[in-house]
Amino acid sequence: MTISELCARLSGLTGAVIYQAIREKLLFGFIEQQLLEPGFIVYAGPEQALEQSAFLERVNSRAGPAAQGPMQSRLETASANELASAIARRSKFQDRRDAGLPKNATDYRIEAAKRAAEAEGASPLAAYVPNLSARGRKPFMIAQHGQEIKEHANRYLQDGRVPKVARMYADYAAEAEDAGRSHPGKETHRKIFLRQIAPEKAAFIWGGKKGFHANRPRTDGAVATPRLRIAGLHVHIDGVYGDVRAAPDEEGAYARPIFYPLIDDATGFALGRGIKLGRGCRLAIGMAHRDCYQRHGILPSKIIHDWGSEFVNTFVPPMVAHFDVGYERRPKSAPRFGAMGEMFNAQLSAYLQELAGGTYFDRLGRSVDGKKKSRATARLTFRQIIEATDHWIFNVWNKSPFGDEDKSPEEQFNESIRCFPEACVRVQEELLHRYATSLPLKAKAISYIDGFRFGGSRFNSTKLPGLLREGIVPASPRLDCMDPSIVYAMTPKGVIALRSLEYKRISGLSFDRRMEEMLCLLESRSISAVNQHERNKKEARLLREKERESEAVKEEIPSSETHTGTKHSSPDFSDIGDAPTLELEIYGS
């Protein structure tokens, strides 16, 4: 009987209790050989366990390679062409013997090979296997051109050239011919290249870490460390641009939301999501965590994410530590380590591409008309896109089996949590949790009259004046991740909530309208700076224009310095004697 079946029969029984019973020999199971998960098999008595142990030992025993001679080894490593040739040679040899024809040199070589195979205990067919790969000048070509082809391939790929073997060979042949050197043919070059440089190494040279991980061979299951298929132990989070555009606003802008879903690694269940307009931001990470514990009352034991700036910062580690949740960064440029999350994101993108304004035809470039592309077909509002996405995530994806599963992700998740409730962290709604999931703001002075100012708004509380009179100044303000009208601040008496005058208006808005208000608040400082810069430029142009007009007016007025002198010059009467004499008439005498 499995752990899942036991927990379903006995109320209050969990996987942790069963594990302790096995450790104390009250129940029996193979902890060293089987992963502890809902499908773990539990035995009531030692007889059943011993019988199953013998079976597992017999089935799982690893047979080592038998001692082989050169003839049998050659047969097992023969290519398909060599095996076909061996069968044909055996048939021809038997026909010659049946016909009584005299033996030739080939017949004598085959007979000697048959005696060697018989003495070795190898299959008789091994005597007829030819060594086609050793024919021709291939070993000589590898010794002569191997290093040369390897060095050229490294240079070619490092230069960012097209990573195609045919293009590489053309460049190599042209270089050799220009230098007057001989070079092998196209097929020989391909085989030497693949022998000298492993595919994952070549991919790393031209494609970096993403190319390396995409071409790296899968790990052998015997040496791999599999994750337990227990829901809530490991959850993936990653940002994915919604492949749909909302209808343009008054300024002609097309909104594309970014979704941050929390996807369980064991079941594919979506626990919650964060949403952000504009650029990716740590605000949406806090929103995803809050959405998760508000929906289910739990958070996962560990969250796995990539190296995006919204994850690698000073906000995420303290937030997850507050909830006693671990976090892990998967290897750089290695999406395969988050396969369940990447698969969910791909399915979500495929769904959104089919909505009005979807970007499916955008990716086809010039092969489709412009009227088919997202900017021409966008007519859904941001609210409609959010509603459609949430409905798909929580009512379609979570409730529909995928792959070869017979249960939906929601059913698998609930079954696993019933067996292993310790795999998740229980969280109850409280003000301190809201503070932990809110966006830290740059600290500014909090005044008695205006309260806290941010983004052109003033946030205040009825408790704030009394705290300030007591000499307590709230610190470390944080913007609520779902309500742009609330700012939380920390005090020695606990967290207080400061609200703006927009609180009552925003508290009645839908989720999409709140996100729009959030975007305006976060970008108000940068928008204000841009607007101020544009106004300063207009004023500067106006001042320059007025200066040019003033200079033009000065040039039109004739100068009077020769008659009136300047401010610092003294009058000159040296030519007064040459002035004409005027007759003066005295009136009134």
Image (cartoon, grey):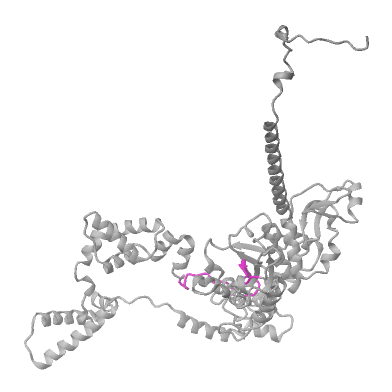
In the image: residue 565, left or right of residue 94: right
Q: Quadrant of residue 414?
A: bottom right
> Looking at the image, is 75 positioned above or below residue 140?
below
The quarter of the picture where the N terminus appears is bottom right
Q: Is residue 240 found inside the magenta-colored segment of the image?
A: yes
Q: Main secondary structure of the magenta part?
A: loop
Q: How many marks?
A: 0
Residue at the right extreme?
Answer: 588
Magenta extent: 219-245
> Looking at the image, is 572 positioned above or below residue 467?
above
Q: Is residue 331 found inside the magenta-colored segment of the image?
A: no
In the image: residue 52, left or right of residue 352: left
Q: Quadrant of residue 395?
A: bottom right
Q: Is residue 460 visible?
A: yes
Residue at the bottom extreme?
Answer: 99
Query: Residue 99: horizontal and vertical position, in percent?
Result: 10, 93
Residue at the top extreme?
Answer: 577
Q: Quadrant of residue 97?
A: bottom left
Residue at 8% across / 85% down in the picture? 103
Query: Residue 588: horizontal and vertical position, in percent?
Result: 93, 12
The quarter of the picture where the C terminus appears is top right
Query: Residue 61: horizontal and vertical position, in percent?
Result: 44, 79
Residue at 52% across / 65% down in the picture? 334
In front of the other: 12 or 480? 480
Q: Is residue 146 visible?
A: no
In front of the other: 288 or 80? 288
In the image: residue 172, left or right of residue 552: left
> Looking at the image, is 580 positioned above or below residue 227?
above
In front of the other: 47 or 489? 489
> Looking at the image, is 567 positioned above or below residue 198?
above
